[in-house]
Amino acid sequence: MKKVIIAALALGISAPAMAAPVWNNIEFGMTRSQVEALYPKGKGVSYQPKNIELSDIKITEKCDADVNIRFDYNGLVREVMIAGNPSMGGRCSNDVLTALSAKYGQPANWDSSAGSILARQGKVAMWPRPDGVAMRFKKFENGAFGGGGLGKSSWELSYTKADAISM
């Protein structure tokens, strides 16, 4: 029996691996009803037609955020977007960026995004995870609609499938 196990390992035969969660306990392709079972409607949980919003989720010791679990037209999870709650001078965006860099290393891409009438100015960092998830972090900067973070979110982090694009 011992030889059979060693032979199976040598040939690379293994049990299928479980998919890593995209965020917390959410996975791409989960149905809306599966997510609703994990997060029943109530205080801090709001159901919208195309997403479920979780409010005041602890991200770091001093920083909270709202989490939007977004669904495609078939009602399957397609994206998780986290928007940091307002913080003095964008302090939380620095804390979150530092934590992401410590966990995933330096971003694969670091770009600036010019502000416009409809979009706030900011810096964008990208990390590709080995499990096929693309992480996009945007640190908002001063702009016409309060990019510093006191009146609005000072950062956003979105998780999408890296293979969700067809080019």
Image (cartoon, rainbow, N blue to C red):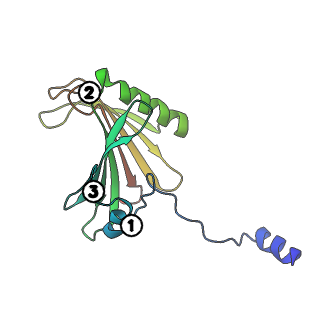
Mark sitting on residue 149: 2
What residue is at 42 percent from the left and 33 percent from the top? 96
Which percent across, then down, holds residue 25?
A: 45, 57
Q: Is residue 165 visible?
A: no
Q: Residue at x 40, y 29 (%)?
A: 62
Instruction: Name which residue type carries label 3.
Output: Ile
Q: Residues under labels 3 and 2: Cα distance?
A: 23 Å
Numbered tag placed on residue 30 in the rendering? 1
Quarter of the image where the N terminus is located: bottom right
User: Along the line of sight, which residue is nearer the eye, 43 or 35?
Assistant: 43
Task: Identify the mark nearer the N-term, 3 or 2.
Answer: 3
Nearer to the camera, 75 or 48: 48
Q: Helix or strand or loop: what does disc 2 sit on?
A: loop
Q: CA distance from mark 3 to mark 1?
A: 13 Å
The mark that comes first in sequence, 3 or 1, is 1
> Image height check: is 23 above or below 36?
above
Give the labeled residue for mark 3. Answer: 52
